[in-house]
């Protein structure tokens, strides 16, 4: 059985994130959407709120589960028996960052392999930060995030 991690902050989850998860669900036996606590960010939603949103959004894929973790991704991967990490890439700037993370994870673990999935063109501009900014300024994010996430954003930002 091959388990893949799809890690991220997911603050909030976007349709771009879910596109990557959906494609992973078709390729791997088990996919763990891994909500990471990033100490360099101030999240709008708690880790548990992001897990709850993702569980609702990923309910259509029976081989996908959601879990939060703190610390090193490679330690979490070892804990859950995953040797594959999948990251979505929107642009070259994403690749520059993710290749460094991939190489560090490989150095730390000796076994974790990173795979990169190119984002669909319609999601190439989409980021959680941009979604939050649009929502804070009163713009519609309904086309950018699943309905439960749009509702949670409206509730949180009212």
Image: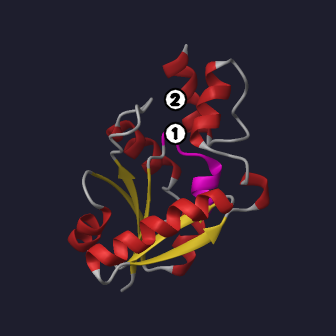
Disc 1 versus disc 2: nearer the observer: 1
The kind of secondary structure element at disc 1 is loop
Question: Residue 78 occupies which quadrant of the picture?
Answer: bottom left
Residue beneath disc 1: 12
Task: Locate the C terminus and report the quarter of the image it occupies.
Answer: top right
Residue pictured at 61% horizontal, 20% vertical: 136
Answer whether residue 31 is magenta in the image.
Answer: no
Relative side of 7 to 116, left or right: left
Relative side of 143 to 68, left or right: right
- Across and down, in percent, residue 74 comes to 29, 69
Can I make out residue 82 in this image? no
Answer whether residue 18 is magenta in the image.
Answer: yes
Q: Where is 37 relative to 100, above or below?
A: above
- Across and down, in percent, residue 113 comes to 42, 80
Q: How is the image coloured?
A: secondary structure
Relative side of 94 to 47, left or right: right
Q: Sequence-wise, which precedes: disc 1 or disc 2?
A: 1
Task: Locate the N terminus and report the quarter of the image it occupies.
Answer: bottom left
Can I make out residue 96 in this image? yes
From mark 1 to mark 2, how far is it between C-alphas? 9 Å
Residue beneath disc 2: 152
In this orientation, which residue lies closer to the viewer: 62 or 156?
156
Region of the chain picked out in magenta, as a range: 11-19
Residue pictured at 57% horizontal, 54% vertical: 17
- Across and down, in percent, residue 101 comes to 43, 65
């Amino acid at each position: 059985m091959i388990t893949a991690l799809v890690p991220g902050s997911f603050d909030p989850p976007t349709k771009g994130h879910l596109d990557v998860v959906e494609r992973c669900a078709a390729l791997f036996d088990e996919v763990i959407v891994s909500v990471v606590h990033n100490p360099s960010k101030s999240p709008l939603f708690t880790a548990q709120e992001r897990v709850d949103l993702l569980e609702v959004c990923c309910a259509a894929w029976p081989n996908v589960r959601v879990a939060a973790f703190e610390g090193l991704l490679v330690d979490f991967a070892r804990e859950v028996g995953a040797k594959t990490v999948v990251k979505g890439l929107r642009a070259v700037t994403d690749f520059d960052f993710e290749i460094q993370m991939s190489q560090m994870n490989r150095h730390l673990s000796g076994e974790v392999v990173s795979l990169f999935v190119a984002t669909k063109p319609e999601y190439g501009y989409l980021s959680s930060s941009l979604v939050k900014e649009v929502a804070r300024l009163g713009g519609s994010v309904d086309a950018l995030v699943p309905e439960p996430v749009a509702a949670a954003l409206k509730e949180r930002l009212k």
